[in-house]
């Protein structure tokens, strides 16, 4: 194999490794992002529950105030009972007293129900808050893991990059320009082996005359289909 070709293969190997590490680094925050999304959802749920809780508390205060006022009214009506003058008045007043009692009973029941609902909601808010706390801890641990992994990847990339720069010095500028161009167009795979007349990357046939030339290994040749730099695979 021509020496410039084996240099390019080395360069490609390092570049592919750098590229792979870059992708790994980009994928690192995936789980953290999912955790953050889940936390946002739960916080939104908690905010809604708290709104509902505030509504229930407002309603409870309203009913309690009504109950207080109506209890006063009931007392007054009951006091009036001692001074009724006729049965018509007596009946009207008894009816009023019964109605107040009935409404107040409904108010007391509503207050009990509201208290029960408030307690239930408070419990749910507490549970969800605990879940968020747990997620926060998980996210913090994940952040630490990511920072550590990023540091490792960065140091690997740094050492590969300096190795790459050394190897790149051995490549002539015009070939390097071609390598860079193809590397960008062909996802980093620039050099392709040709096995029995077929380009191993694009799977197209190399014309027989070119293949013979390739076997003689006298100059650099390019795949007519994918334009990659080719070399004959020796069995
Ligand atoms: Zn090809």
Image (cartoon, rainbow, N blue to C red):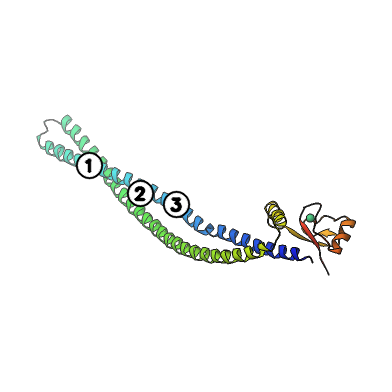
**Mark 2 secondary-structure assignment:** helix
Q: CA distance from mark 3 to mark 2?
A: 15 Å
Ligand 1 appears in which quadrant?
bottom right
Q: Which residue is mark 1?
A: 65
Badge 3 local density, few (<14 within 10 Å), some, or many (20+)? few
Q: Are marks 3 and 2 in contact (CB under 8 Å)?
A: no
Q: Which residue is mark 3?
A: 40
- Quarter containing the C terminus: bottom right
> Is 160 displayed left or right of 174 in the figure?
left
Badge 1 local density, few (<14 within 10 Å), some, or many (20+)? few
Above or below: residue 122 compared with residue 231: above
**Image x and y of residue 1, in percent:** 79, 66
Q: Residue at x 82, y 55 (%)?
A: 204
Answer with mark 1 or mark 3, whichever residue precedes in sequence.
Answer: 3
Answer with mark 3 or mark 2, whichever residue precedes in sequence.
Answer: 3
Q: CA distance from mark 2 to mark 1?
A: 23 Å
Q: Which mark is residue 79?
A: none
Residue that lies at the very extreme toward the left in this rendered image: 83
**Mark 3 secondary-structure assignment:** helix
Q: Which mark is residue 50?
A: 2
Indicate yes or no: mark 2 CB to ligand 1 under 8 Å. Answer: no
């Amino acid at each position: 194999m021509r020496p410039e070709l084996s240099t390019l293969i080395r360069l490609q190997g390092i570049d592919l490794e750098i590229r792979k590490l870059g992708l790994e680094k980009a994928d690192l925050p995936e789980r953290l992002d999912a955790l953050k999304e889940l936390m946002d959802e739960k916080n939104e749920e908690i905010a809604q529950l708290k709104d509902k809780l505030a509504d229930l508390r407002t309603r409870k205060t309203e009913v309690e105030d009504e109950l207080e006022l109506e209890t006063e009214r009931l007392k007054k009506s009951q006091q009036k009972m001692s001074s009724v003058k006729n049965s018509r008045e007596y009946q009207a007043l008894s009816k009023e007293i019964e109605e107040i009692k009935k409404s107040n009973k409904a108010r007391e029941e509503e207050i009990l129900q509201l208290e029960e609902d408030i307690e239930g909601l408070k419990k749910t808010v507490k549970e969800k808050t605990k879940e968020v706390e747990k997620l926060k801890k998980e996210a913090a641990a994940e952040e630490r893991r990511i920072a550590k992994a990023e540091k490792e990847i960065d140091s690997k990339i740094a050492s590969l990059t300096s190795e790459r720069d050394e190897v790149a010095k051995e490549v002539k500028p015009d070939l390097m320009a071609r390598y860079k161009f193809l590397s960008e167009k062909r996802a980093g795979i620039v050099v392709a082996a040709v096995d029995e007349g077929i380009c191993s990357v694009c799977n197209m046939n190399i014309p027989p005359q070119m293949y013979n030339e390739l076997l003689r290994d006298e100059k650099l040749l390019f795949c007519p289909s994918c334009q990659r730099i080719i070399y004959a695979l020796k069995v």
